Amino acid sequence: MIFCVEDEQNIRELLVYTLETTGFQAMGCADSRELWEALKKETPELILLDIMLPGEDGYQVLEKLKSSSATREIPVIMVTAKDAEFDKVRGLETGADDYVTKPFGMMEFVARVKAVLRRCSRNHPENKTLSYGDICILVGKHEVRVNGVKVELTRKEFELLQYLMENKEIVLTRNQILCQIWGYDFDGETRTVDVHVRTLRQKLGEAGNYIETVRGVGYRIGG
Ligand code: CA
């Protein structure tokens, strides 16, 4: 089930219709109040979240979703009419998995939905751990520890760190990272990678210095 939170009825119906004809189950919510009601009854696989909503806006809703353990793991795609870089960065920093900018093509929209769902359903072996220096990842538990202290990461930050640590000492290009973590490779979207590397470094504290920027190429851990 995919929840589509969108106040404009035409767009909401189009989203639901497009998803249903692609084989998904989807339900529209006209505002955050309807979303919170729907969440009491069912946990969706994905939430599409418009930013400009009456009442609580998309950012406020996203913050609430990500601050509750009951809803934190639900992937969120922000749907925004705004094309400003600022909005994308803010959404991604708050923990959105992706965003689409209105007006968008239905092919691209469906591709992004599928990519997010694919990424989030990736199977993790239960007891696998990865470590580098002071960082230890318990892959199955989705847990990261620095010097034994748990660090809270968004799903994308976690996947990014895991990908870097699975490829120790190898320089990963922004496009490789985008492909691996977001499941697509659209031109001009590599800023997304930089935003996540920045927040990941901040959250890791001193251990964030392990992530090296290779100028003009990409990133690596353990150079
Ligand atoms: Ca709206």
Image (cartoon, helix red, strand yellow):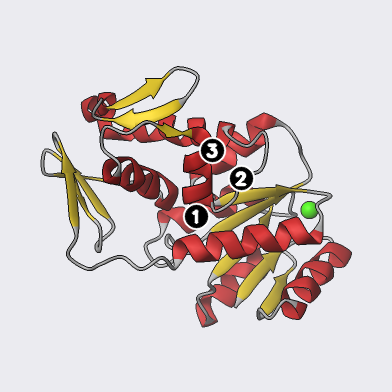
Lower position in the chain sequence, tag 3 or tag 1: 1
**Residue 169 pos. (x, y %):** 26, 32
**Which quadrant is the C terminus positioned in?**
top left
Q: Is residue 58 above or below residue 90?
A: below
**Residue 161 pos. (x, y %):** 33, 42
Mark 3 and mark 1 residues within 8 Å of each other at the beta carbon: no
Mark 2 and mark 3 residues within 8 Å of each other at the beta carbon: yes
Label 3 crowd bin: few (<14), some (14–19), many (20+), radius 10 Å? many
Residue 57: tell me if it is visible: no
Q: Amino acid at mark 1?
A: Lys
Which of 164 and 56 lies nearest the eye of the viewer? 164
Q: Is residue 136 left or right of residue 22?
A: left
Lower position in the chain sequence, tag 1 or tag 2: 1
Q: Is residue 73 left or right of residue 38?
A: left
Residue at left 64%, top 57%?
Answer: 112
Q: Nearer the viewer, mark 3 or mark 1?
A: 3
Q: CA distance from mark 1 to mark 2?
A: 30 Å
**Residue 109 pos. (x, y %):** 72, 58
**Residue 188 pos. (x, y %):** 67, 33
Count of picture labels: 3
Q: Is residue 28 above or below residue 75?
A: below
For numbered disc 3, what is the local secondary structure?
helix
Q: Quadrant of residue 49?
A: bottom right
Q: Amino acid at mark 2?
A: Asp
> Badge 2 is on which residue?
185
Residue at left 70%, top 64%?
Answer: 110
> Badge 3 is on which residue?
175
Q: CA distance from mark 3 to mark 1?
A: 31 Å
Lower position in the chain sequence, tag 2 or tag 3: 3
For numbered disc 1, what is the local secondary structure?
helix
